């Protein structure tokens, strides 16, 4: 008998027992609770020390620090033409706090666009510095001379950086290092001669530059804080210096942010379909999970208090070769004492692992809550998929010192709010409307504060697509 004939015979044979499809109507199935792909490990929320605050705000008092204008510039690209936003020129130390929009616009128009190939020298050590260079795109390496005459790297500059700004104030300034393009670079050059020409016509700019030259330099420590006068190693009866510790007059305050949603459940569902699982509980559980995911995203990316946007520019470094190498991670560690953790996108961790494999290095792991977490120099590297990956396949790696006592990074919350189900997270009953729909207001209050600048560092523009 052929296969087709056997199938036809099976179909015509009378059914001798109850089929499985009919039997399921009488059976109690075993079900899972509703699943959700969005749930992640959320290591940042788990590892960040949380401080309960009152009044909805947290004020960070610091010693008086003198700003030096080491910000970052923003550019606008139209086709192959790149222009600096005029107001961004106020980030240059010589133009800091200068606010004449008309003059700044004229200065922006005087910037000359230049393109450099990889390996090309932009400025040479010892030559006259007669222009400030604004790096719109690419990476530039600052190269100095070591104690024995060899070249040594003084750092990597990337998009938004500037160099040669001393040329705007000192006509005798020289380049103290060589600037060489690591990749193809687009640079805007603002000559000192053009600035002087505009200053001759603008009294406000001329006066601003004159005051900037004449203001005596404040005595500060290496962190920019007002110096505390001390005497040490003396003998006899010399005059001991008098001093005091000055504070910032307008300390920063972090207000609690909020994430909210209104959960709606029909009373018919809540009344009739609560076995074997409570529908209201499951709806609230999944909503809370989504709220926590958004909370961690905001702690990383929010422009007001997010870690990526609140890292000081002198705590941001660039990878020397683009990929996240052990050398770059060591450089990131060296910027602060007592680093407690790294945060990196899982793809950045994979890229770092490839670099370790190339060098024959095997990172140690530690057990945290039953999870094996890789470490570098004893500091755990936690995955965080909230750190963005750009279209150019670059991302960032965050290093933090945490804790209020350690002058680190802390999370802020308001424990004890009404209808709280977790600290600073509440589910509040809002009533039933005329369509018999129950409403719950689900709310989370949170923020993050960086107590001192060196508590937070970022390795930027990490390439994750190179093998």
Image (cartoon, grey):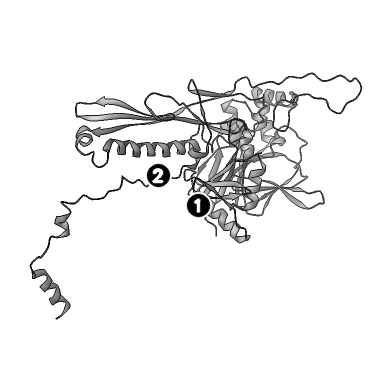
Which residue is drawn at the image coordinates 31% and 39% (left, top)? Answer: 282
Image coords of residue 101 (percent x, y)? 56, 27
**In the image, 150: left or right of 185?**
right
Along the polypeptide, which appears first: circle 1 or circle 2?
2
Image vertical order of residue 243 relative to residue 391, above or below? above
Label at residue 347: 1
Q: Which residue corresponds to mark 2?
A: 39
Image coords of residue 131 (percent x, y)? 69, 39
Image vertical order of residue 255 relative to residue 342, above or below? above
Q: From this viewpoint, is residue 380 visible?
A: yes
Query: The C terminus appears in which quarter of the rendering?
Result: bottom right
Q: Nearer the viewer, residue 309 or 293?
A: 293
Q: Secondary structure at mark 2?
A: loop
**CA distance separating discs 1 and 2:** 18 Å
Which residue is drawn at the image coordinates 90% and 25% (left, top)? Answer: 235
Label at residue 254: none
């Amino acid at each position: 008998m052929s296969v087709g004939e056997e199938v036809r015979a099976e179909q015509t044979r009378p059914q001798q027992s109850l089929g499985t499809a009919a039997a399921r109507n009488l059976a109690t199935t075993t079900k899972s609770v509703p699943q959700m792909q969005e749930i992640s490990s959320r290591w940042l929320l788990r590892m960040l020390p949380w401080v309960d605050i009152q009044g909805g705000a947290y004020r960070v008092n610091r010693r008086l620090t003198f700003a030096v204008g080491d910000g970052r510039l923003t550019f606008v690209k139209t086709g192959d033409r790149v222009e600096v936003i005029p107001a961004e020129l106020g980030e240059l130390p010589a133009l800091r706090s200068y606010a004449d929009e008309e003059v700044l616009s004229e200065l922006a128009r005087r910037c000359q666009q230049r393109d450099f190939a990889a390996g090309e020298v932009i400025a040479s050590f010892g030559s006259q510095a007669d222009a400030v260079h604004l790096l719109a795109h690419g990476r530039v390496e600052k190269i100095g001379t070591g104690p024995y005459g060899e070249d040594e790297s003084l750092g990597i500059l990337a998009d938004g950086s500037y160099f040669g700004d001393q040329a705007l104030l000192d006509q005798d300034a020289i380049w103290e290092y060589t600037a060489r393009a690591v990749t193809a670079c687009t640079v805007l050059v603002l000559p000192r001669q053009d600035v002087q020409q505009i200053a001759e016509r603008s009294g406000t700019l001329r006066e601003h530059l004159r005051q900037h030259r004449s203001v005596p330099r404040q005595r500060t420590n290496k962190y920019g804080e007002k110096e505390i006068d001390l005497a040490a190693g003396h003998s006899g009866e010399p005059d001991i210096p008098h001093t005091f510790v000055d504070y910032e007059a307008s300390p920063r305050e972090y207000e609690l942010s909020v994430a909210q949603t209104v959960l709606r459940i029909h009373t018919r569902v809540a009344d009739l379909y609560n076995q074997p699982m409570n529908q209201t509980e499951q709806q609230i559980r999944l909503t809370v999970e989504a709220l926590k995911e958004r909370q961690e995203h905001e702690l990383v990316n929010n422009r007001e208090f997010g870690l990526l946007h609140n890292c000081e520019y002198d705590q941001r470094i660039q990878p020397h070769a683009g990929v996240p190498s052990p050398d770059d991670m060591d450089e990131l560690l060296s910027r602060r004492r007592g680093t407690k953790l790294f945060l990196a996108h899982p793809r950045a961790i994979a890229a770092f692992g490839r670099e370790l494999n190339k060098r024959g290095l095997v990172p140690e792991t530690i057990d945290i809550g039953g999870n094996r977490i890789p470490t570098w120099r004893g500091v755990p590297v936690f995955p965080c998929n909230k750190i963005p990956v750009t279209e150019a396949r670059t991302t960032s790696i965050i290093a933090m010192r945490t804790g209020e006592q350690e002058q680190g990074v802390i999370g802020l919350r308001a424990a004890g709010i009404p209808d709280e189900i977790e600290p600073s997270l509440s589910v509040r009953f809002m009533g039933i409307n005329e369509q018999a729909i129950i409403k719950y207001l689900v709310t989370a209050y949170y923020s993050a504060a960086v107590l001192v600048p060196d508590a937070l560092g970022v390795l930027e523009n990490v390439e994750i697509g190179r093998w």
